């Protein structure tokens, strides 16, 4: 509510009213606004749009700026349906490569604009420059169907074919349709969900939107407008402006807008200079026919009206709470009211604890809300602060995308089934899949799944009951026994399994009783230091991360030892949970040991923990083979004396010469990388010591224990805000593909991992890359290099001094380099599924689109298991799929 109150406060301001009047009174011309700092421009815009009806286009400098502006307006104008207009192109350098999902999002926005009289549109130059079918063209090309009216079913199907809709068995993406008797399923390019149109004779009996995966209806609709893919249609007037009679055009920097427009037209019409000039001139002409509002530091033209504001950005306090409170007292002397916006109620509680500890008399309005940047407005005597800026936490925007269902397991499995494959029906047991068959039901033809049971008994299953069957999973060498329809044997088997589960539950109760009988160290409740540490995390906690954090702290405060497994995909925040747990144990007076699988990861964790705990009195050290014997001996001496609070190391820390004065917590990172001998040694550590295990792809035994309940389990399946799936491409080895992939990433300012797991010829791979791209900087790294040299190369790559790192799979575990967003894995068929998933997790750790290329010899030469592993990696996006990948890995290995 606080943001709406701030907006209303600006709506009542005389200056804002004057700006709104100027917009309404002029059909052309420019208004310039200066000194708008932080998110004040968003607040100001939300106030002006409330006073000025009609359409408003907001052209931001780039896609990211547009997303942040969109994010602010969603909180400032919750009652408005703010529209985000994207481009359909994946990349500027390839304007022929269109994304069907982006086509759908853009078409849906265009149709909403065409059917409305007013609204707010957020966009960016590339989307504005893209040729757009006119409003009349969109309406005439679309097919509107209404419930209760009569239509020819054959003519509708004919129209869908003419508009290049693809006929499929089940619709799963825009541009597809399916027919079953008197039912037509269509996925329009202007709808979030596909619709099911049911005919009774020639009359439409009902129109329902439905979920792709479950086939369950979401909403009943009175009508539907089906729009084809119009992204490549010829257009007389190529710009979005043709949709509007009157609008207010907002832009940060018109000079930058025109520069990007020039770049776009040069890329689009590279061989036709006349067309470049023509489109650019028409673009400028379209902009100039509407009133414009510019705000920024540079202006392209002389303004008709100019308004100045007295605002300043939120200062940087470098996480210093005392400095921030002192600044608040200075504002109070100037009669400026402070407001602190926090992302969540949990963060509000943390800040309340911190402020009350540092200054109990502090008067600040602490509210749950979100803006991208804080500001101080002296005219309004208002200071708006954001917690993510106070703690220097990266603020990720919420990407506006059309609502999409997850991939349907049932439909995917159905497409993969072949006649003869075994399936399990929840009510009738194990049978064989015998294909699809159309049968008449009450006068209508419907699709059925044909299942064969013992004695060739047949069962026809309606597609609406797909949720009742699953593909049989078991050893291929041990075929299952087919069930008998009507026999009680399947029910008896289910009862037998239930009894076994009951026995396991009894054993688990005994196990938990034994664990609770053991006494461990009880960590004290959270102090304000713990709250300050958690508040300073540079990202917002995801819901699953928050639950896991609370579960870990609760376990540590219990009197019996913790044994918790945290299963979370790579880049989903497991390390942050380890930092918080370690800090809690250290505050409680205990030492912490962290076991990691590789020397590189030990070094990176040391840097990560040191950065996060730099403001706290915590002594951290690490040991690995990079360090000399003298350095290790000195470190171990300090550990034994209790002078080191946290020791990070590889399996070296389980040796007998490593003695802790008072160990309270053992953290095991990537448990699947350790052998049996190491785990036997760990048992000596685990007596009366809290144990926290982190993994992205747990080994089968660990997974089984956790699922059984023998170990406490936390799953982090929620991706961080705006995390995009890694686009995984399976490709035969090709130098041209490598050239394009590397050059694209380097040209956008990123870095590349090239994985080649053969030390014998790894330098030849580096030489090939240098030959293909002579201007880029390439480094080579592998485990057998000299320790100091390897450490230096890795640090230089992390610091951006190399464009490409050619290495073995030593980068597989734990490396966190947000600027590296392309990975090329050579001889990908030689890796296991978990290894591939771990390596792919090194990219896609920022808000940039990431790519993973799996290079193999010809696919025909691969084993069936290798092909299956690579296909599974393509199927799973990497957004919280580590748990599923582990399950599929177990399934593939039988």
Image (spheres, rainbow, N blue to C red):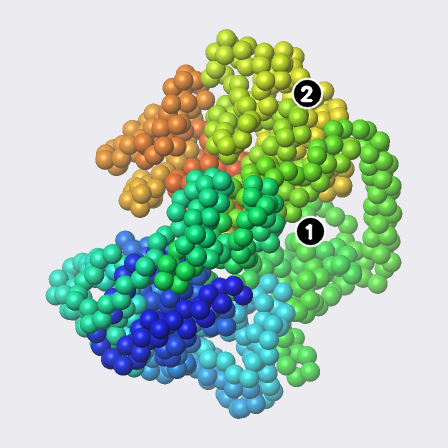
Is residue 345 something that shows in the picture? yes
Circle 2 sits in a helix, a strand or a loop, which is it?
Answer: loop
Q: Secondary structure at mark 1?
A: loop
Quadrant for the C terminus, please.
top right
Q: Is residue 279 visible?
A: no
Vertical side of 433 occupied by 441: above or below: below
Of all residues, the one furthest to the left in this rendering is: 274
- In the picture, the disc for residue 223 is none
Q: Quadrant of the N terminus?
A: bottom right
Q: Residue at x 66, y 26 (%)?
A: 589
Point out residue 710 in the picture as x, y percentages from the top left corner. Answer: 76, 37
Residue furthest to the front: 333
Q: Name the residue located 43 percent from the left edge and 40 percent from the top edge.
A: 318
Query: Mark 1, residues whose alpha carbon is within 10 Å: few (<14), some, or many (≥20)?
Result: some
Question: In the picture provided, is 281 more to the left or to the right than 489?
Answer: left
Position of residue 644 measured from the top left corner of the image (x, y, whole percent): 58, 20
| Residue 887, position as x, y percentages in the image | 64, 44
Residue to which mark 1 is pinned: 472
Q: Do the CB atoms of the residues marked 2 and 1 lie less than 8 Å apart?
A: no
Closer-to-camera residue (815/447): 815
Left or right side of 596 for 510: right
Determine which residue is flagged by label 2. 662
Q: Compared with residue 153, is residue 457 higher up or lower down, i.e. above or below?
A: above
> 386 and 356: which one is in front?
356
Query: In the displayed structure, would residue 657 be above or below residue 194?
Result: above
Q: Is residue 108 left or right of residue 778?
A: right
| Residue 339 percent coordinates (x, y) | 49, 56
- Please, is residue 605 above or below residue 145 in the view? above
| Residue at the outermost top position | 630
Q: CA distance from mark 2 to mark 1?
A: 51 Å
Label 2, residues with CA under 10 Å away: few <14, some 14-19, many ≥20:
some
Residue drawn at x 23%, y 35% is 775
């Amino acid at each position: 509510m606080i943001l709406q109150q701030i907006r209303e406060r600006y709506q009542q301001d005389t200056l804002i009213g004057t700006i709104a009047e100027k917009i309404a009174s002029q059909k052309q011309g420019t208004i310039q606004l200066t000194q708008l700092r932080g998110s004040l421009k968003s607040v100001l815009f939300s106030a002006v749009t409330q006073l000025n009806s009609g359409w408003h286009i907001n052209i931001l400098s780039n896609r990211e700026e547009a997303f942040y502006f969109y994010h602010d307006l969603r909180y400032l104008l919750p009652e408005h349906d703010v529209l985000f207009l994207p481009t359909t192109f994946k990349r500027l350098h390839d304007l022929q490569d269109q994304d069907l999902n982006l086509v759908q999002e853009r078409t849906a926005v265009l149709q909403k604009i065409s059917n409305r009289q007013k609204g707010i549109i957020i966009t960016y130059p590339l989307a504005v420059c893209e040729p757009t079918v006119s409003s009349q063209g969109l309406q005439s090309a679309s097919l509107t169907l209404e419930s209760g009216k009569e239509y020819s079913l054959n003519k509708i199907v004919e129209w869908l074919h003419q508009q290049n809709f693809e006929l499929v068995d089940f619709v799963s993406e825009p541009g597809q349709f399916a027919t079953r008797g008197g039912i037509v399923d269509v996925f329009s390019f202007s709808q979030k969900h596909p619709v099911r149109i049911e005919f009774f004779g020639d009359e439409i009996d009902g129109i329902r939107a439905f979920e792709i995966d479950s086939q369950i209806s979401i909403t009943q609709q009175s009508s539907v407008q089906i729009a084809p893919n119009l992204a490549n249609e010829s257009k007389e007037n190529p710009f979005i402006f043709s949709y509007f009679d009157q609008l207010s055009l907002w832009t940060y920097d018109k000079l930058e807008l025109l520069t990007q427009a020039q770049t776009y037209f040069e890329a689009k019409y590279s061989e036709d200079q006349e067309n470049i000039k023509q489109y650019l001139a028409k673009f400028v002409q379209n902009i100039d026919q509407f009133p414009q509002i510019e705000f920024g530091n540079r202006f392209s033209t002389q303004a008709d009206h100019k308004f100045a504001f007295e605002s300043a950005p939120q200062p940087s306090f470098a996480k210093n709470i005392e400095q921030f409170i002192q600044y608040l007292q200075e504002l109070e002397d100037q009669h400026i009211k402070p407001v602190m916006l926090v992302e969540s109620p949990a963060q509000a509680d943390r800040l309340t604890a911190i402020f009350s500890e540092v200054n109990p008399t502090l008067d600040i309005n602490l509210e749950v809300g979100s803006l991208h940047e804080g500001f101080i407005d002296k005219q309004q005597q208002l200071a708006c602060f954001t917690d993510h800026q106070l703690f220097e936490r990266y603020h990720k925007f919420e990407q506006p995308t059309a609502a999409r269902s997850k991939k349907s397991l049932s439909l995917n499995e159905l497409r993969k089934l072949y006649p003869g494959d075994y399936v399990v029906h929840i009510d009738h047991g194990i049978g064989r899949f015998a294909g699809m068959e159309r049968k008449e039901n009450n006068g209508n033809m419907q699709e059925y799944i044909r299942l064969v049971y013992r004695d060739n008994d047949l069962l026809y299953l309606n597609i609406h009951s797909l949720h009742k069957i699953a593909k049989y999973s078991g050893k291929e060498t041990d075929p299952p026994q087919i069930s008998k329809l009507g026999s009680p044997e399947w029910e008896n088997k289910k009862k037998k399994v239930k009894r076994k589960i009951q026995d396991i539950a009894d054993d688990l109760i005994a196990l938990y009783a034994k664990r609770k009988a053991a006494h461990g160290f009880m960590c004290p409740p959270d102090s304000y230091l713990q709250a300050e540490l958690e508040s300073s995390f540079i990202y917002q906690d995801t819901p699953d991360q928050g639950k896991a954090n609370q579960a870990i702290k609760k376990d540590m405060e219990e009197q019996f030892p913790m044994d918790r497994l945290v299963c979370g995909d790579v880049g989903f925040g497991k390390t942050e949970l380890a930092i918080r747990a370690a800090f809690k144990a250290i505050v409680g007076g205990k030492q912490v040991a962290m076991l990691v699988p590789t020397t590189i990861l030990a070094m990176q964790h040391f840097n990560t923990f040191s950065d996060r705990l730099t403001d706290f009195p915590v002594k951290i050290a690490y040991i690995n083979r990079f360090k000399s014997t003298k350095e290790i001996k000195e470190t171990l001496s300090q550990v034994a004396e209790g002078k080191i609070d946290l020791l990070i190391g590889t399996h070296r820390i389980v040796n007998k010469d490593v003695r802790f004065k008072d160990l309270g917590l053992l953290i095991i990172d990537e448990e699947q990388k350790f052998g049996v001998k190491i785990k036997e040694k760990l048992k000596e550590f685990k007596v009366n010591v809290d144990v926290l295990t982190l993994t992205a792809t747990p080994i089968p035994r660990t997974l089984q224990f956790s699922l059984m309940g023998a170990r406490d389990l936390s799953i982090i399946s929620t991706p961080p805000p705006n995390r995009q799936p890694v686009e995984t491409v399976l490709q035969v080895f090709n130098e041209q593909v490598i050239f394009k992939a590397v050059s694209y990433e380097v040209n956008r300012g990123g870095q590349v991992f090239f994985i080649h797991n053969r030390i014998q010829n790894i330098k030849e791979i580096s030489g090939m890359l240098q030959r293909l791209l002579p201007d880029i900087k390439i480094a080579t790294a592998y485990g057998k290099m000299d320790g100091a040299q390897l450490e230096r190369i890795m640090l230089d790559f992390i610091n951006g001094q190399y464009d490409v790192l050619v290495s073995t799979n030593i980068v597989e575990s734990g490396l966190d380099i947000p600027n590296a967003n392309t990975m090329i894995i050579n001889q990908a068929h030689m890796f296991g599924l978990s290894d591939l998933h771990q390596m792919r997790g090194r990219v896609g750790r920022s808000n940039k689109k990431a790519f993973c290329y799996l290079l193999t010899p010809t696919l025909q030469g691969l084993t069936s298991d290798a092909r299956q592993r690579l296909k599974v990696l393509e199927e799973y996006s990497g957004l919280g799929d580590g748990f599923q990948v582990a399950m599929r890995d177990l399934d593939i290995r039988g």
